[in-house]
């Protein structure tokens, strides 16, 4: 069967939206769709995901499925407990999706890891050896790629930067801790903090309105983005000090605020990164609109083995020599090792 005839299904699950796409062997998105993440119990949320998958698959039969989900998750058993999806607690997502997909291989990863993988292949981190990717949206997720390989951790939850504590006297976080990066930098928490300071108190507004007001010079909105930028910078610098990297890529809905977010982040990074080996930290906006989907799809390709995505087995370091494409949202990078995540049993 030709590469063009084989696809994998990539799924990206977050607290605000769920997206799915059919992705070719060279990383091209062939068909995609998205829905708002519904509220409700576990089965209601999954039913909506099932309908989305059916629409995207149509008459296609994907050879594998890769899933990027909000965390935390239990990668070994294929369970997810997203902080921002109350209906899913230890939900058997891998088994349920495998059943829908006809028993094909299914691989699970944290959505932040998938975002980082996508940007590392063909986005803002494509010329880096190591990269921290951060998604700032309903929550704050992250992923690390070190020396060309994603850092997953024992449970699959490594690089959970959004729940790094940066303020010991800070607000309670949805994770149960206090003063996490997410309490200052996520869209809903920034809006809530702005309202408590008197900003658009009686209006139904979101982070996009907050960023527009900040760009227009609203003092409260600007201060909220500065606080969020400081929290993100603290998490970025702490991570860089631990793993020794210089490239950081930020995406997600809140990152669309542009300079309103990136200016304070970069200013605070420069202030906090004083050790010589992190003094040159680069913080850049994401380049791909669908980095999470592309990264999730790569997990599916990995489930099929190093030959599946047009690569040839390497005889040395377990790397695959994978074709690349020149398109801005396509391609698989030979820097990435095999496999990128751990198969959930079943």
Image (cartoon, grey):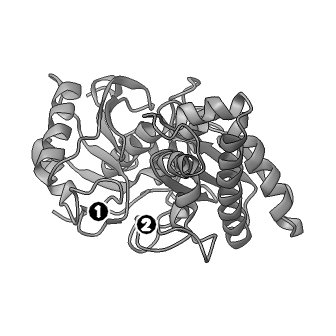
Residue at (81, 64) in percent of width and height: 272
Residue occupied by mark 2: 157
Which of these two is toward me, 188 or 87?
A: 188
Q: Label 1: how many residues lie within 10 Å, few (<14), some (14-19) or many (20+)? A: many
Q: Is residue 102 visible?
A: no
Q: Position of residue 17 (x, y in %)?
A: 34, 38
Residue occupied by mark 1: 81
Direction from residue 102 to residue 206 in the image, left or right: right
* Numbered disc 2: secondary structure: loop
**Quarter occupied by the C terminus:** bottom left
Residue at (46, 66) in percent of width and height: 173
Residue at (62, 44) in percent of width and height: 250
Q: Are marks 2 and 1 in contact (CB under 8 Å)?
A: no
Q: Position of residue 287 (x, y in %)?
A: 61, 32
Residue at (85, 60) in percent of width and height: 271
* 85 is higher (above) or lower (below) than 344: above
**Quarter occupied by the N terminus:** top left
The residues tagged by marks 2 and 1 sit, at their Cα atoms, a distance apart of 11 Å
Name the mark nearer the viewer: 2 or 1.
Answer: 1
Q: Quadrant of residue 275?
A: bottom right
* Numbered disc 1: secondary structure: loop
């Amino acid at each position: 069967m030709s590469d063009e005839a084989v696809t994998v299904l990539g799924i990206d699950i977050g607290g605000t939206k769920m997206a799915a796409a059919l992705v070719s062997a060279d990383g091209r998105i062939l068909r995609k769709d998205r829905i708002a993440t519904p509220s409700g119990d576990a089965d209601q949320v999954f039913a909506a995901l099932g309908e989305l998958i059916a629409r995207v698959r149509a008459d296609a039969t994907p050879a594998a499925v890769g899933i990027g989900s909000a965390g935390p998750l239990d990668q070994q058993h294929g369970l997810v407990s997203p902080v921002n999806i109350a209906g899913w607690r230890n939900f058997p997502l891998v088994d349920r999706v495998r059943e829908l997909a006809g028993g094909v291989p299914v691989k699970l990863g944290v959505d932040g890891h998938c975002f980082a993988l996508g940007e590392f292949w063909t986005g803002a981190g494509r010329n880096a050896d190591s990269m921290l990717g951060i998604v700032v949206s309903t929550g704050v997720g992250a992923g690390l790629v070190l020396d060309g390989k994603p850092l997953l951790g024992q449970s699959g939850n490594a690089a959970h930067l959004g729940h790094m504590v940066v303020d010991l006297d800070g607000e309670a976080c949805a994770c149960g801790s206090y003063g996490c990066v997410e309490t200052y930098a996520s869209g809903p928490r920034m809006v809530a903090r702005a309202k408590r300071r008197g900003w658009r108190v009686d209006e139904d507004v979101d982070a996009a309105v907050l960023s527009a007001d900040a760009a227009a010079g609203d003092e409260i909105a600007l201060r909220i983005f500065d606080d969020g930028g400081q929290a993100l910078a603290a998490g970025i610098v702490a991570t860089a000090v631990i793993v020794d990297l210089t490239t950081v890529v930020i995406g997600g809905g809140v990152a669309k605020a542009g300079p309103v977010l990136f200016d304070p982040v970069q200013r605070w990074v420069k202030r906090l990164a004083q050790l010589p080996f992190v003094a040159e930290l680069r913080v850049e906006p994401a380049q791909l609109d669908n980095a999470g989907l592309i990264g999730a799809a790569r997990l599916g390709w990995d489930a099929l083995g190093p030959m599946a995505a047009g690569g040839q087995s390497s005889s040395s370091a377990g790397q695959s020599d994978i074709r690349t494409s020149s398109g801005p949202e396509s391609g698989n990078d030979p820097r990435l090792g095999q496999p990128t995540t751990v198969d959930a049993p079943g």
